[in-house]
Image: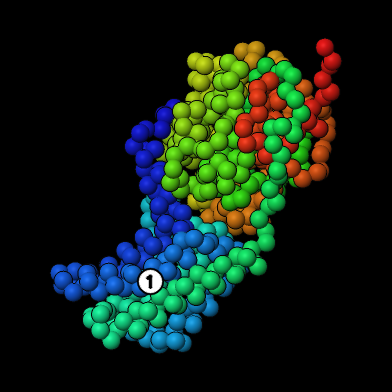
C-alpha cells in the first residue's frame, strides 16, 4: 500500500489544467500558435504582433472560458466559426494552421493522454490508442477530451489570432479597424453564448433549499459507526448488469433509493464536496476538479463531528485533498488499475486500526479509472465493478471480525455515473445523472425501495443525524429518515 506523495498531490492539480476544458482551451491554442510560428520567435516584431493578436482575441477567449458547451450545445459552436470566415475570408491561408492544431489535439488526447499518460499512471496497454480515438470523438462532457467541443473552439480562436497577427504589423495604423472588428466579434460571441445557456441549457438538476433549521432535530446518535463506501464513477445500469452478489445482497437487506441524483457538474471533487458539506457548488465553492482555491467554504460533516468529540476520515485519491484537506488519507492513484482499489482498502484498514473513526468514507477509484481509459460501455468496466464488490465484501467482513459492525450503518453509492466516450461525466449525459444508493445495517429498514427522487446533498445531514452531530451549516438536502426504523422513545 502506497500513500499519495506530495509530488503526486501537486501533479494532480497541475494535470487538471490540461484535463479540464476551460483552462485547456487557452493553453492549447496559445501553445499551438507559438509552435506554428516558432521560426519567427527571434523576430522582435513577432512578439508585438502576438500581443496585439491576443488582446484582440481576449473577448473570445473569455467567452469560451466562462461557458462550457457540453452535449448538444457543442453543435452551436460551428456557427461563429462560419460567421467569421464569411466576414473576413482567409480560410485557405489558415488551413495549414488548422491542420496543425487538429493534429496536435489528437496527438495530445489519443497518444499523450490516452496512451502514454494512462500507461504510466495505471498500466493500460501501449495499444490503448486503438480504442481511445473513438472515445475522444464520442465524448460529450466539457473536458479537453471532447473533440466535438474543443475543435470548433480551437479553430475559431486560431483563425482570429492568425488574422490579427497578419494584420497587426502596424497595430496603430490602418489595421486598428480590423482589431476593433475582432473585439466586437468576440463580444458578439459572448452574448451568443449567454443566450444559448439562458434559453437552451435546461438539464441542470433543481437544487434543494433545506436548511439546518428545517431539518428534524438531532436527539442522539442512531449508530455507533457509519461506513460510506463510494464506488467512484459506477453507472447505475452497469451495476445492475454486473455480477456483484455482495452489494446486491446488502441492498436487498436494507433500503434502496432508486432515483438518487448526483449534483451538477458531476465531477469527482465537486460531488464529494457536495456529499460531505450537504450543499451545492455555488456555496461550497468547488465547481470543477480544477480547484483554484483550496478547501470548501462551508462546514463539512467532519467539522460537525469534531463539535461533539467524534472523528471522521475520508480515504481516497489525492484530488480530494483539494477540497477536504487534512480530513483525507490519500492513497496513490499512480498504480496499475488492478492494484489501486486493493491499496485503498488496505489504507482504510490501517486508518481504522490507528484511528477507529466514527465515520469512515472509502473511495474506490478503479471503476472510474477504467471508464476514463477504456470506456464505460465495455466489458472491462463491468469487470471492475465486480472486483469492487469482492473487495468491499472482504473489507466489511474484516470490520465485522473486529466487532466494528455492531450498531454500524453502511451506505453504498457512486458519486456520479459515466457516459459514453472517455468515461465522460460532468454535464449529465445519459448514464451520469442517476447513481446507485442504498443503506443497510443498524437502524435501517429492511427490503425497502424508495422511488421518490433524492439528491446526494442529503448525505451530510443524514450522516449527522445517524451519528448525533449538528448539521453542517449549509445543509440543503433532507435527512433520509424514510430509510430508518422508527426510533424508540426514551
Question: Looking at the picture, how far across and down is residue 187, in whole percent?
Answer: 47, 72
Residue 117 drawn above or below residue 83:
above
Q: Residue 288 placed where, x, y %?
A: 51, 49
Mark 1 is surrounded, within 10 Å at the Cα level, by few (under 14), some (14 to 19) or many (20 or more) other residues, namely many
Work out whether 410 lies above or below 416. above
Question: Please, what secondary structure does the residue beneath circle 1 have?
Answer: helix
Residue 285, how many percent across, how many down? 52, 44
Q: Nearer the viewer, residue 345 or 461?
A: 461
Residue at (28% x, 86% y) in the render: 174
Q: Is residue 51 left or right of residue 13?
A: left
* Residue at (58, 51) in percent of width and height: 265
359, above or below 41, in the image: above
Residue position for label 1: 57
What is the quadrant of residue 138 in the picture? bottom right
Q: Is residue 339 visible?
A: no
Classify the position of the N terminus by image quarter: top left
Eyeballing the image, is 11 above or below 197? above
Q: Horizontal placement of 72 versus 450: left or right?
A: left
Q: Quadrant of the C terminus?
A: top right
Amino acid at each position: 500500500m502506497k500513500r499519495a506523495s506530495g509530488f503526486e498531490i501537486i501533479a494532480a492539480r497541475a494535470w487538471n489544467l490540461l484535463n479540464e476544458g476551460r483552462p485547456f482551451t487557452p493553453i492549447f491554442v496559445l501553445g499551438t500558435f507559438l509552435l506554428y510560428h516558432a521560426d519567427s520567435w527571434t523576430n522582435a516584431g513577432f512578439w508585438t504582433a502576438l500581443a496585439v493578436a491576443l488582446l484582440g482575441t481576449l473577448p473570445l477567449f473569455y467567452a469560451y472560458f466562462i461557458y462550457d458547451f457540453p452535449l448538444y450545445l457543442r453543435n452551436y459552436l460551428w456557427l461563429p466559426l462560419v460567421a467569421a470566415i464569411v466576414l473576413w475570408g482567409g480560410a485557405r491561408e489558415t488551413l495549414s494552421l488548422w491542420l496543425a492544431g487538429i493534429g496536435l489535439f489528437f496527438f495530445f488526447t489519443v497518444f499523450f493522454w490516452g496512451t502514454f499518460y494512462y500507461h504510466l499512471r495505471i498500466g493500460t496497454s501501449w495499444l490503448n490508442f486503438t480504442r481511445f480515438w473513438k472515445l475522444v470523438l464520442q465524448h460529450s462532457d466539457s473536458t479537453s477530451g471532447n473533440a466535438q467541443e474543443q475543435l470548433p473552439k480551437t479553430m475559431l480562436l486560431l483563425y482570429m489570432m492568425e488574422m490579427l497577427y497578419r494584420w497587426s504589423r502596424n497595430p496603430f495604423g490602418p489595421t486598428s479597424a480590423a482589431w476593433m472588428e475582432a473585439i466586437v466579434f468576440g463580444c458578439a460571441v459572448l452574448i451568443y453564448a449567454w443566450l444559448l445557456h439562458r434559453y437552451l441549457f435546461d438539464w441542470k438538476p433543481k437544487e434543494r433549499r433545506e436548511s439546518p433549521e428545517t431539518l428534524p432535530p438531532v436527539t442522539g446518535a442512531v449508530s455507533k459507526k457509519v461506513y460510506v463506501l463510494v464506488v467512484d464513477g459506477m453507472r447505475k445500469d452497469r451495476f445492475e448488469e454486473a455480477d456483484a452478489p455482495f452489494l446486491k445482497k446488502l441492498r436487498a437487506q436494507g433500503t434502496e433509493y432508486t432515483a438518487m441524483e448526483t449534483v451538477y457538474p458531476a465531477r469527482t471533487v465537486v460531488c464529494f464536496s457536495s456529499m460531505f458539506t450537504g450543499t451545492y457548488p455555488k456555496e461550497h465553492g468547488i465547481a470543477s476538479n480544477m480547484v483554484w482555491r483550496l478547501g470548501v467554504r462551508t462546514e463539512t460533516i467532519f467539522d460537525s463531528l469534531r463539535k461533539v468529540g467524534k472523528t471522521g476520515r475520508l480515504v481516497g485519491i489525492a484530488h480530494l485533498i483539494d477540497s477536504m484537506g487534512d480530513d483525507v488519507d490519500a492513497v496513490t492513484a499512480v498504480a496499475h488499475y488492478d492494484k489501486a482499489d486493493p491499496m485503498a482498502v488496505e489504507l482504510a484498514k490501517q486508518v481504522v486500526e490507528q484511528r477507529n473513526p466514527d465515520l469512515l468514507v472509502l473511495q474506490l477509484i478503479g471503476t472510474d479509472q477504467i471508464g476514463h481509459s477504456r470506456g464505460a460501455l465495455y466489458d472491462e468496466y463491468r469487470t471492475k465493478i465486480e472486483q469492487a464488490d469482492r473487495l468491499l465484501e472482504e473489507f466489511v467482513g474484516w470490520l465485522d471480525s473486529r466487532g466494528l459492525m455492531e450498531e454500524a450503518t453502511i451506505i453504498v453509492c457512486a458519486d456520479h455515473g459515466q457516459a459514453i466516450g472517455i468515461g465522460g461525466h460532468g454535464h449529465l449525459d445519459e448514464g451520469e445523472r442517476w447513481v446507485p444508493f442504498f443503506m443497510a445495517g443498524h437502524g435501517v429498514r429492511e427490503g425497502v425501495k424508495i422511488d421518490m427522487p433524492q439528491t446526494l446533498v442529503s448525505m451530510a445531514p443524514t450522516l449527522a443525524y445517524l451519528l448525533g452531530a449538528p448539521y453542517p451549516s449549509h445543509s440543503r438536502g433532507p435527512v433520509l429518515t424514510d430509510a430508518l426504523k422508527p426510533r424508540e422513545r426514551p
